[in-house]
Image (spheres, rainbow, N blue to C red):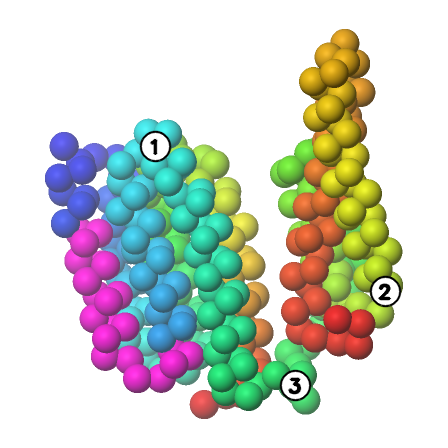
Amino acid sequence: MSYEIALPVVLVAVAIAFIALMIEKDDLHRLLLTDLAEITGLAIIALVATDLAEALILPGLVVGISELMALSEVYLVKEGLTETPKRVMHLEVMDSAPAILGGVLVIYGIVLSGFSGGAVAGLGLLFWFFCKGHDEAFEIIETASGYSWALWIAAFFIFMLAPQYWLFAVMAAGGGILLKVMAKMALVGTMRGGRDV
Amino acid sequence: MEPELLLGLAILIIGAVAAAFPRPKTYLSRIIVLEIPAWGLLLMMLAYDEALALLTFIAVTAISTFVMVRVVERRGEP
């Protein structure tokens, strides 16, 4: 019953988003409006409810964020804005917060372990790099990321060849994917540019 | 209909209008206003118990705001 009422309302929101996208002339405003179009589009899928909606929304979100990243890079190259800005945004909280918040997030992520733990710990590292800058050696993080991937694959071979050691394999896979996701997410924090990137 | 769904639909419409025609038409104000329809979508997901999608959407919104602020930062204020 609620679907018949809600769907037209959401379709009106979609129409508003696309009309604004048509009227807009400025490229960067258009880039921001694609985010609005994405949100209203996801609302249509969310109305489906059940697990099908979740299964459709998750890849939609991942594709959406990667599309936004790619389009923003294309825009920056097209407008010739590739050098780092002279006056970057800087807030008081960016000096005091990273040590505590980053530490808490990383420790909690390691306790969680696995993919979601890697995402949480990676968010902590991302926040740290974003606020404090990053003169750290990225080769070390990348090396750790490569070894953790090998650990993950090895854990899968243990599952297949020696299933009686399943607990060891679970721990190895959880630790490996934790490091892998953490290293990849931490890279996002360096997108402001810097010496070692 | 659940109250969450009604509230979510209302906020989605209001937010879509506000983000489509922001009053001081600057990049930063549009980024801030984009949070309103996102809240509407979150309430709709809450009404249908889509917990995993809801949490992922929150995380992705944080990263996408970061990406958009970075572009606006390099572009400069118009």
Residue B20: percent from the left, percent from the top?
29, 71
Please check the rendered image and state whether residue A13 is part of the magenta-colored stretch, yes or no: yes
Name above or below for residue A19 compared with residue B57.
Answer: below
Q: Quarter-wise, where is residue A188 in the image?
A: bottom right
The answer to whether tags 2 and 1 share a subunit is: yes
Name above or below for residue A31 compared with residue A36.
Answer: below
What crowding class fits label 3: few (fewer than 14 Cα within 10 Å), some (14-19), or many (20 or more)?
A: few
What crowding class fits label 2: few (fewer than 14 Cα within 10 Å), some (14-19), or many (20 or more)?
A: few
Q: Say if mark 3 contacts mark 2, CB within 8 Å.
A: no
Q: Amino acid at mark 3?
A: Glu
Name above or below for residue A79 compared with residue A91.
Answer: below
Judged left or right of residue A100, residue A192 is left
Residue beneath disc 2: A136
Q: Which residues are magenta?
A: A9-29
Judged left or right of residue A111, residue B11 is left
**Which residue corresponds to the image point at 14% horizontal and 42% vertical from the top-left?**
A5
Q: Earlier in the sequence, mark 3 or mark 1?
A: 1
**Which residue corresponds to the image point at 47% horizontal and 70% vertical from the top-left?**
A71
Q: Secondary structure at mark 2?
A: loop
Numbered mark located on residue A52 in the image: 1
Q: Quarter-wise, where is residue A116 in the image?
A: top right
Q: Earlier in the sequence, mark 2 or mark 1?
A: 1
Residue A56 visible, this angle: yes
